[in-house]
Amino acid sequence: MKKRRIVIITEGNTDPTPAKTAVGVIRYRTGEVVALIDSTQAGRDTGELLGVGNGIPIMASLTETFRLQPDMLLIGTAWAGGQIPTAWRATILSAIEHGLDIVSGMHQFLNDDEEFKKAAQKHRVELIDLRKTPDDLTVSKCLAKEQKCFRVHTVGTDCNVGKKVVCLELTRAFQEKKKDAVFVGTGQTGIFITGSGIALDRVIGDFIAGAAERLVLENTNHDYLFIEGQGAITHPLYSGVTLSMLHGFMPQALILVHEYGRPIMRGSKDTPVLPPEKLIPLYESIAAPVFPTKVIAVALNLRRLDDRAALKEIEKVETNTGLPATDVIKFGTEKLEEAVLRFEGEWRKEHALD
Amino acid sequence: MKKRRIVIITEGNTDPTPAKTAVGVIRYRTGEVVALIDSTQAGRDTGELLGVGNGIPIMASLTETFRLQPDMLLIGTAWAGGQIPTAWRATILSAIEHGLDIVSGMHQFLNDDEEFKKAAQKHRVELIDLRKTPDDLTVSKCLAKEQKCFRVHTVGTDCNVGKKVVCLELTRAFQEKKKDAVFVGTGQTGIFITGSGIALDRVIGDFIAGAAERLVLENTNHDYLFIEGQGAITHPLYSGVTLSMLHGFMPQALILVHEYGRPIMRGSKDTPVLPPEKLIPLYESIAAPVFPTKVIAVALNLRRLDDRAALKEIEKVETNTGLPATDVIKFGTEKLEEAVLRFEGEWRKEHALD
């Protein structure tokens, strides 16, 4: 992928939860993000507010960022419903007029907006809608299970807990060890980071499992697929997307991702986040009739804890679940790599006779 | 709703499974269907082939039906993927030219087809896409659970087992007893029969639960909502739609619908249909974290059995599940009505203190 000079608008939302797209891009398109735009935080450092991006300045306006010669503006937030805030339109239009390509992961498409489209044509810039899905999607043919590639799918106890990060970290670790691994993007941020994938939460209901299947078939030449999860099977807003993916990908192994210290499902009124030991049997029992899969490890997001408290929490989760657990950002991916390779070995042995 | 004179095209597919839309419309828009078009079955009687519609002729071509003065052509099939067969285009165009409105429940919209659209404008007929969904759908706000209306939702062990029929029969039975009940349509056939609803399998993933919630909020002035289900929670093609609906509707009660003698999920390669006693705990356990719901009865579709064998099967299912069971077409809705009223009484008592 061509290196870009990206400014990210996070106006009034420079916080890891609403700005999760910004966080992902800063972490994995290292060196490409030149500034953030947020007039409410101007002058502060990105690393301080988002936990990643030390040294990336936060500026008050698009105009200020021009001296850094950006060539792309990314909408850095992701919220329920996915509408572009009206107050941001002027910034987007100004970016177009100054020759920046615009990237959005919103449900509301840039390319459906006549004003943006006209301006983009005039100034010859690209409008990139990360959530735009292929036109020829259809229902699943149940083909994923026949593929020999080893599919590891991250699933969550909530949305926005780190499912994409775990997959990206594992893909990187496997690739560094010269294993043929690929990250399979299923959401706007993962697609922007890696340049491929389908935003499955944007696909119409009947075709989500089919779109998941297509992502497997497109990557079946690789040995390991690390497939980004979406939502959670008990999330009152998004559960259906999660389940369609589980049944469409037909993964051999799941890694359950859980954030410490989040009592209520993001975006819900009062739906509790279940602890890993309660959610594991739910995921396994709902997957089994279609394709048996096993939760092989728990990936914890312990950003709220210091290292000592984090280690204690890991021990607790390992005791409660009987599975290896870790935080890949704090302690690396080694434990999860081992869990994947161990289970893959068992699985291939068991299925060698098939 | 204005009475129409409907011809239904089921060409080469006059069988209850592919022609499920035809079956539903014949059963519930009584007297409005004047003929079927199927050149492979011309001269035979609809009742003989579909089990409903005695006396409705099957004709070889659209032209033949003109003497019955139809004013509407309905595409009577519903299959995975929802594309209009190319061979049917000539019939559809001819119907338009002869002044018939066209109704389709396909994923491929009549109104997206330039040739159909132009012809319809010229001949001033309507193109009705039953699966077209509202443009302003968004995510769920988890409001359904706050509504006092009693929500009974049919769920299945497979798709196409009779979930809509059970809801329509129960609605009719309740209305006959002067209870304020309404059928909530969620699929193309139910929408055509009752004139309202949203085709939830057509909604984009993130918004299905929100669309389900909207259907509740639009009907909250009624005492009883009988909400048509879609797919099955273990269906490899459609499970996500089913789960989004379960979490969006937040029904107090579920009725599990099961067809006897169907070993494999429709449209799948080899996914087994689970027996009711195995599926009931799955539905209840996946619903519970969002809104606790209970399966209160099993509605069996025993069309493959004679009455004696049917009664034996009912007894078997009642023993296995500990729940009342019946076939509403063979034996009426009484048992299910009782189950609904009994459970409603318990539920209202339990929640009176809230």
Image (cartoon, coloured by chain):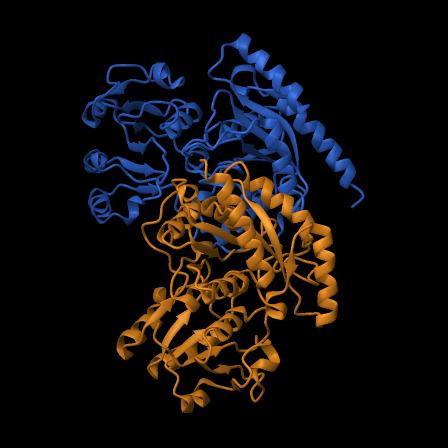
Chain colours: A orange, B blue
* Residue A204 in view, yes or no: no
Seen from this angle, which residue lies furthest top?
B308
Picture residue at 56% right of the left edge, 33% below the top: B154
Q: Residue A130, located in which quarter of the rendered image?
A: bottom left
Query: Vertically, is A118 above or below B117?
Result: below
| x and y, in percent, of residue A330 in the image | 63, 70
* Residue A24 in view, yes or no: yes
Q: Residue A90, located in which quarter of the rendered image?
A: bottom left
| x and y, in percent, of residue A15 in the image | 59, 74
Q: B339 and A259: which one is in front?
A: A259
Quarter of the figure with the N terminus of chain B: top left
| x and y, in percent, of residue A42 in the image | 56, 87
Picture residue at 52% right of the left edge, 48% below the top: A345
Picture residue at 39% right of the left edge, 23% below the top: B16
Q: B168 and A277: which one is in front?
A: A277
Q: How many marks?
A: 0
Relative horizontal placement of residue B38, taking residue B31 as reference (left or right): left
Query: Vertically, is B62 above or below B217?
Result: above
| x and y, in percent, of residue B248 in the image | 57, 46
Q: B54 and B319: which one is in front?
A: B319
Relative horizontal placement of residue B353, taking residue B132 as reference (left or right): right
Seen from this angle, which residue lies furthest right?
B353
Q: A322 and A283: which one is in front?
A: A322
Query: Vertically, is A57 above or below B52?
Result: below
